[in-house]
Image (cartoon, rainbow, N blue to C red):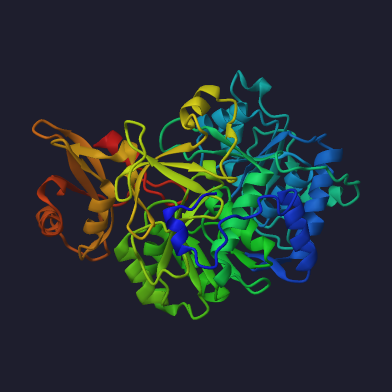
Amino acid sequence: MSQRPWHANYGELPIEIDADAHPSVVAMMEAAMVEFADRPAFKCFGQTLSYADVDRLSRHFAAYLQSRLGVRKGDRIALMTPNFMAFPIAFLGIARAGAVQVNVNPLYTPRELEHQLRDAGAEILIAFNGVSATVAEVLSRPDAHSLLQTVVTIGPGDGTEAALPSPPVDARLQGTIAFAQALVEGETLPFVPVALGGEDLLFLQYTGGTTGLSKGAALSHRNLVANVQQFKAIVADQLRPGQEVIVTAIPLYHIFALMVNFLTYFSVGAENWLVPNPRDMDGFIDVLKASRCTVFTGVNTLFAGVAAHPRAKEIDFSNLRMAAGGGSAILEPTSAKWKALTGCFIREGYGMSETSPVISFNLASAQGYNGTTGVPLPSTDVILLKEDGSQAAQGETGEVCVKGPQVMRGYWQQPQANAEAFTADGYFRTGDLGLFTTDGLLKLVDRKKDMIIVSGFNVFPNEIEGVATACPGVLECACVGVPDEKTGEAAKLYLVLAPGAELSAEQVIAHCRSQMTAYKVPKLVAFVEALPKSTVGKILRRELRQTA
């Protein structure tokens, strides 16, 4: 790759990585399970699985898939569960059998689940007992005869010796298979290793649904091996094999936690504390206290929630060496509160489902919050395209377009969407607006579709939200554009107040006016109890626009 402006920041960081360092993700994970066999791999609900346990149990599950369910290389298998021990066991079993994992959000409605199963052509669904009513609803529909041959049900303690209470399987579902029983049977069955290469599919990762009907990003073994190698290169200064402890509160079915928390840190023998329900903040705080983690990842709302919790000061963060943020913009007030609590600022990164996911990340040389997503990873090329198709100069805004070994091959069975998603010379169009600072750092300005145009001026919700969040008494907020007779559009701010805070709309507007030029100041302020969010914690502006 030719020199790019950001390469001046690299120092000892290699410009290129070896995307074929492992022939497949399975080979990479199997190497870790041998090297770190005796180390704890996962902790959840007071239970521990070692790397050897994960190796053994996932092999049993792969054998069951092959021998009992007839799974063959390339078959799609959907996995719909929170962060239980069963997730990594099921994933590695699916991957070792050569199948493609379709990651499904357990909070999906029947309509969303049916769309994803049909689109992926999944014949097997592995699902948490607690969502079996949703599965039953889908399978009870008149035209459901072509959907799913097998449903495997998961309890919270499956894969461990814990007899944890589990919701009953919906009575409408007949002939389901218990995941725990599949593991027992698999122990007696032969497992036949499958030849896997970099171009074989590993995941169908459906886009978050923030923009309408979700599409499946087809991610290969090579995509994920490459992104693991890229991420390990950029955090090499803070990566100690066999010593890291990471807390995973972001759902593993989300590509951020899946690649960073699971694949990357598993490959270096980390101890991973799984948090099935981070909305249970007291339980989450207990995990943070017990784990004494060295690494923590999250989205802005997760960091803000911990920092604002009355028990946050009970947590010993003295071992924390890196806090990594992504999924949505990290706001400066949030990073400041997190640093005051832990001593670590939040190193922000940027990525998408379609890019496995990480595109850029802040280097260790960053001394504090800088409002950027850092530098593009090794072997990653980023160009910024203006509306006329020309490349934006440094400091100018353009659509972020990406090329690299972590970029998906395309959307699953979506030729028209693929034609629109890539430039003629092969760059993936992210739909995000960004610029390169004078230091060569990538700064995201906003999503193209979220931009508000006030009297012909471009207004970016991220900027307004960052200013408003710094107003005393504001816990979190979101900004959207609404129709306005005079200006075409106006900014409307939705605010959640901090506990016990009292604040008027006039006070918020006055605060924003003191920090921003007049056309950016929100015209309307609405106080709400909570903001609509995805399961990852990303605020869904789309839903606010629909109710504005």
Residue 116 is situated, as x and y percent measured from the top left of the image, at 57, 32
**In the picture provided, is 520 more to the left or to the right than 370?**
left
Q: Quadrant of residue 18?
A: bottom right
User: Residue farthest to the front?
Assistant: 2
Which is more toward the observer, 284 or 471? Answer: 471
The answer to which of 172 and 303 lies nearer the viewer is 303
Q: Residue at x 57, y 61 (%)?
A: 14
Instruction: Return the x and y of residue 531 as percentages of the image width and height.
Output: 33, 49
Left or right: 339, with 207 as reference point:
left
Q: How many numbered marks have been drawn onto this rendered protein structure? A: 0
Q: Position of residue 88 (x, y in %)?
A: 68, 54
Q: Is residue 406 above or below residue 161?
A: above
Instruction: Let me know if residue 493 appears in the view.
Output: yes
Q: Is 339 drawn above or below residue 163 in the view shown? A: below
Q: Return the x and y of residue 460 as percentages of the image width and height.
A: 26, 46
The residue that appears at 64% across and 56% down in the rendered structure is: 263
Q: Nearer the viewer, residue 454 or 117?
A: 454
- Residue 522 visible? The answer is no
The residue shown at (42%, 73%) is: 344
- Identify the residue at the far top of this view: 143
Picture quadrant of residue 203: top right
Decide: is 424 above or below 24: above
Classify residue 413 as left or right of residue 447.
right
Image quadrant holding the C terminus, namely: top left
